[in-house]
Amino acid sequence: MADLFSLKNKIALVTGASRGLGRDMAVCLAEAGATVLCAGRSVKDLEATAKAITRKKGKAFVVPLDITDEKATVAQIRAVIRKHRRIDVLVNNAGVIHRENIVDTATPDFRKVIETDLIGQFVVSREVGRHMLAREYGRIVNISSVMAVLGRASVAGYVSAKHGLVGLTKNLAAEYGPHVTANAIAPGYIRTELNVPLQKNKEFGAMLEQRTAASRWGTPHDLRGALLLLASDAGAYITGHTLVVDGGLTTILA
Ligand SMILES: NC(=O)c1ccc[n+]([C@@H]2O[C@H](COP(=O)([O-])OP(=O)(O)OC[C@H]3O[C@@H](n4cnc5c(N)ncnc54)[C@H](OP(=O)(O)O)[C@@H]3O)[C@@H](O)[C@H]2O)c1
């Protein structure tokens, strides 16, 4: 049964692998047998991720990548495919957030979130997708958020981009079948650098525990099952889907 979820001999590109959820997903994919291409802007941190993988006898490479720089991204993905011969799994995880009420938000701050959390995913999915289509194999996993299901004051750019990413996922599924699947994971609240202000907010923590069936914050490990399902052949007949992994947050009113 473990073979169903195996990524042995697969090559996986993970964006935003330098820390947080991306780092844990990179380690998880490597533990399932994949060679992991750890992509992002902070090379030192990517090297730490790669080291965490090689320490456990896995295989990893560092790929410097800023997904908001389209020209560089196109060139880097082509170079990666030339070097490694293929990308079997793409995890579009890189993301940023901007916290400010709409009336105070300057357009460039809104645009930066859309550029990273939506347009960057589009560019990477297009470039890697062409290659996957030609090879007739691929698994794309987009990391969206419960903010693709709900709205929340002060994060309009993020909510807009994450809703958009769910739409993009459906279109990737529509255009990339039958051999390439595209799905999204919508995580609930998981402690990382992205949400430090919320971790410090006791009221928010109490609200989260009260309205989440699991009664706790998530951990990066909580995403591993969903990731392996959608990245492996276990998920061959699942495409265009957004799998919410939030401890019940978005299905329970109170
Ligand atoms: N933590 C949560 O509760 C939660 C919940 C739902 C969804 N998510 C989503 O999960 C993903 C990871 O979030 P996280 O919590 O792990 O946040 P994080 O700790 O802040 O990590 C974000 C990652 O994205 C990378 N990144 C940002 N801009 C980039 C760019 N232009 N090009 C390439 N890489 C870039 C960062 O690397 P560099 O700075 O080194 O480039 C970093 O590795 C995000 O898409 C986020 O929206 C998180």
Image (cartoon, grey):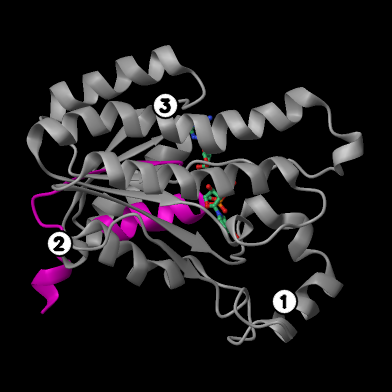
> Of discs 1 and 2, which sits in the foreground?
2
Q: Quadrant of residue 113?
A: top right
Looking at the image, residue 200 lies above or below residue 160: below
- Of the image marks 1 and 2, the number of the one nearer the N terminus: 1
Residue positioned 26% across, 62% down in the render? 238
What's the distance in space between the residues labelled 3 and 2, CA to CA?
Answer: 27 Å
Labels in figure, total: 3
Of residues 91 and 137, the one drawn nearer to the viewer in this rendering: 137
Q: Quadrant of ligand 1?
A: top right
For label 1, the SS is helix
For label 3, the SS is loop
User: Which residue in the protein does label 1 denote?
Assistant: 208
Pointer 2 residue Cβ closer than 8 Å to ligand 1? no
Residue positioned 23% across, 19% down in the render? 79
For label 2, the SS is helix
- Of the image marks 3 and 2, the number of the one nearer the N terminus: 3
Q: Which mark is residue 233?
A: 2
User: Which residue in the protein does label 3 denote?
Assistant: 65
Horizontally, is 144 left or right of 107 in the view?
left
**Magenta residue span:** 1-29
Q: Is residue 118 in view?
A: yes
Of residues 121 and 242, the one drawn nearer to the viewer in this rendering: 242
Residue positioned 91% across, 37% down in the render? 103
Q: Quadrant of the N terminus?
A: bottom left
Horizontally, is 206 left or right of 27 in the view?
right
Pointer 3 residue Cβ closer than 8 Å to ligand 1? yes
Does the residue at mark 1 contact the one at mark 3 (Cβ under 8 Å)? no
> Is 15 one of the magenta-colored residues?
yes
What's the distance in space between the residues labelled 1 and 3, CA to CA?
Answer: 34 Å
- Residue type for callout 1: Leu
